[in-house]
Image (cartoon, coloured by chain):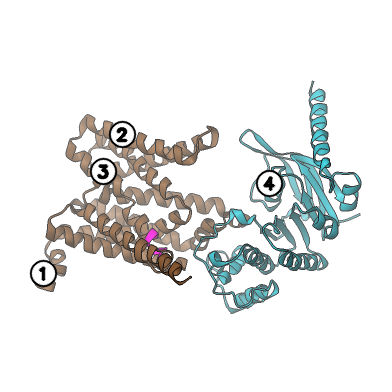
Chain colours: A cyan, B brown
Amino acid sequence: MCDHLISLRDISVYYGNRHALQNVSGVFCEGSLTAVAGPNGSGKSTLLKVLSGVIKPSCGEVIFRDGKKPVTAYLPQASRINRDFPMSLLDLVLTGFYPVVGEAGSIGLTHKAIAKKAMADVGLEGYEKRLICELSGGEFQRALFARVIVQDAPLILLDEPFTAVDAETTARLIRLLLKWHEEGRTVICVLHDLLLIKKFFPESMVLHGKCLGSGHTHDMFEQKLLSFDLDMAEIQTSRIHSNHNQAHSHDV
Amino acid sequence: MTFEELIIAPFLKFSFMQRALAACIALSASGAPLGFFMNQRRMSLVSDAMSHAILPGVAVAFCIAGAGTLPLAIGGLSAGAIIALFAVFLTRYAHIKEDAVFTLMFLLSLTSGTVLLSFKGTGIDLMHMLFGDVLAIDDSALCFIASVASLTLVAIAATYRGLLLDCFDPDFLALSGRGRYVRHLFFVLFVINLVAAFQVLGTLMALGLMLLPAIAAGFWTKRADAAILFGVAMAVFSSFAGLLISFHAELPSGVTVVLFCSVLCLISVLLGRRGSLLSVFLKEGKS
């Protein structure tokens, strides 16, 4: 038995009339490395936002062990960030200290040293003064990882961190992810790449509005909830429809 | 004409020029930083619509209580708030795009405000509401503008990092639990500054000293703090130069200030250091 860091109880999220998530329950163990998979619009990002506290679920609850949300690092989708903002790369990484120092706390040499070390860890040494609008997609993603490093959080949430990133950078970032896992941090990562999920993520959760299944990644592939076979996409959809129908017949 | 007569004497001799300059400097100091944040949120169009949204409110206040500073301010604030909330409500629940909503709000406010004013006011009153009257600022209006500017600067200083983060990465700010509070504070500051600017520049130009410097700054500097300071400096300079030009050439003052600011902004777009027409042209020439 693992130590449940987070338990989800019947989480639903509505945006207006649209159901982004419906009755999702599940657990995330402390120190686990979990992939959240599912097609576009299946509520993966919404789940991450609920876990991070950025949005409150419309109903249901998120229960943290000891009743308190641990310090959380969150890497939003790069598309949600204003990349034209006039800001240097070092400043971007330093924003990672904002939850700690707040408005009035000073950013000192120690903070800068930590930020520079984090930038070196992701291979961005010497980029301190570069503007974020001058970075390539991969460099920007690495900078966001550097910010996650400086947050030094026990719970790390990543939303599609490998989108628009080349193979070499992906490999580098995956190594970082595995290092966090070794250090005992809990990592939850939304991603599409089944190959990466199969190879590196021991646990996974499959979403499609509702939670289709969660547990060992190996089992998810066994149960065909995750599959490389393109036809499976159709089977998944039909399974959801049959679930819906069952639910409706119960209603009646 | 000596240098002193040209530049300094108008402000020494005439108290209406001193008041006008003081009001414009106060507006520049608080409005230009807000303009920077608004511009970074890509909400220039939205802010334009919001500046017109105060017109029906001031028109109602004018019909009921006359042209006093306080009634106009209260009317403007309430109309600004109601129309902004209504716009948010519409975009959320009706199938209409945000920019379309703001176009509707803009025209609805401008026309309804003008019709309301016509019940009691004259054509001159309407001109004052639309273009302001920077040379007729009385003590109460000046106090109101100075208070708004001071309050705004203190509030910006107290939430500066949050305001920056909210423009750049709102989800990350939300993680710290301060997102909502920072955003609400920002919009409150924005609306009260619009109402203060309305007293000087009218609803049509209230944004002039806020947004134009912010747009221009982007063509000269690559740092947020420098862009904000640049914006304030440009707004103050435009106020000073605009008032002087209008004084000597006998032009309408508020309009001249905003026109001067617009010309500086246009020059920045054409000749600025980063991303201007000239710099893009030079870069293409090199490559």
Q: Answer yes or no: are tags 4 and 2 on the same subunit.
A: no
Q: Quadrant of residue A149?
A: bottom right
**Label 1: how many residues lie within 10 Å, few (<14), some (14-19) or many (20+)?**
few
Q: Position of residue A103 (x, y in %)?
A: 53, 64
Residue A214 coordinates in the image, percent (x, y): 84, 47
Q: In the image, is residue B73 above or below residue B230?
A: above
Which subunit holds the residue at mark 2? Answer: B
Q: Residues within 10 Å of mark 4 (few under 14, many from 20)?
A: many
Q: Position of residue A248 (x, y in %)?
A: 79, 25
Position of A48 compared to A251: left or right?
left
For disc 3, the chain is: B
Q: Disc 1 versus disc 3: distance between alpha carbons?
A: 32 Å
Q: Earlier in the sequence, mark 3 or mark 2?
A: 2
Other residues around mark 2 within 10 Å, as few (<14) / some (14–19) / many (≥20): some
The image quadrant of residue B82 is top left
Residue at numbered disc 4: A46
In the rendered image, residues at marks 3 and 2 fall on the same chain: yes
Inter-mark Cα distance, 4 to 3: 45 Å
What chain is tagged by disc 1? B
Does residue A141 sit above or below B192 in this rendering?
A: below
Q: Label 2: which residue?
A: B111
Q: Which mark is residue B130?
A: 3
Which callout, 1 or 3, points at the residue further toward the start of the chain? Answer: 1
Magenta stretch: dominant secondary structure: helix
Q: Contact, CB < 8 Å: mark 3 with mark 2?
A: no
* Residue at disc 2, secondary structure: helix
Q: Does the magenta-highlighted stretch encompass residue B285?
A: no
Residue range in magenta is B214-219
Residue B5's disc number: 1
Q: Are marks 1 and 4 on the same chain?
A: no
